[in-house]
Amino acid sequence: MAYLSDRKFAEEQGLNLEQVRKLIRSLDIPFFSTGKGDHLVYMFDPEQLDKAVQDKKTKRRERRRRPRPNLKD
C-alpha cells in the first residue's frame, strides 16, 4: 500500500485542503495523521479512497432505481 498525503492529493485534484480532509472523514476510510497544528498531515491509501467513492456512487444509483410502491388502493 502506497500512502498519499492529503496535501499532495489536494494539489493534484485542485481542491482545498479542508475539502480533502472532510472527504476522507466522510467516506470513513482508514488514515493516520502526523504532526500538529499547521504541520498536520493526513496519510491515506488513494486506492481505498477510489473504492469508497465508487461504492458511494453505486449505492446512490441503486437507491434511485428502487421501484416506487404502488399507491393505488
Image (tube, rainbow, N blue to C red):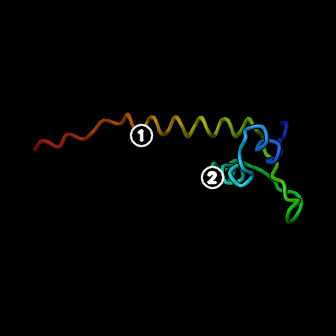
Q: Position of residue 16 (x, y in %)?
A: 72, 50
Q: Is residue 38 left or right of residue 46?
A: right
Three-letter code for the amino acid on which mark 2 is drawn: Ser
Relative height, residue 42 to residue 65 (above, below):
below
Q: Local crowd at mark 2 within 10 Å, few (<14), some, or many (≥20)?
A: few
Relative height, residue 40 to residue 3 (above, below):
below
Q: Local crowd at mark 1 within 10 Å, few (<14), some, or many (≥20)?
A: few
Asked where in the image residue 62 lies, by quadrant, the reply is: top left
Residue indicated by mark 2: 26
Q: Is residue 25 left or right of residue 40?
A: left
Distance from Cα at disc 1 to Cα at disc 2: 19 Å
SS at badge 2: helix
Three-letter code for the amino acid on which mark 1 is drawn: Arg
Residue indicated by mark 1: 63
Screen quadrant of the C terminus: top left
Q: Position of residue 63 (x, y in %)?
A: 42, 40
Q: Is residue 3 left or right of residue 70?
A: right
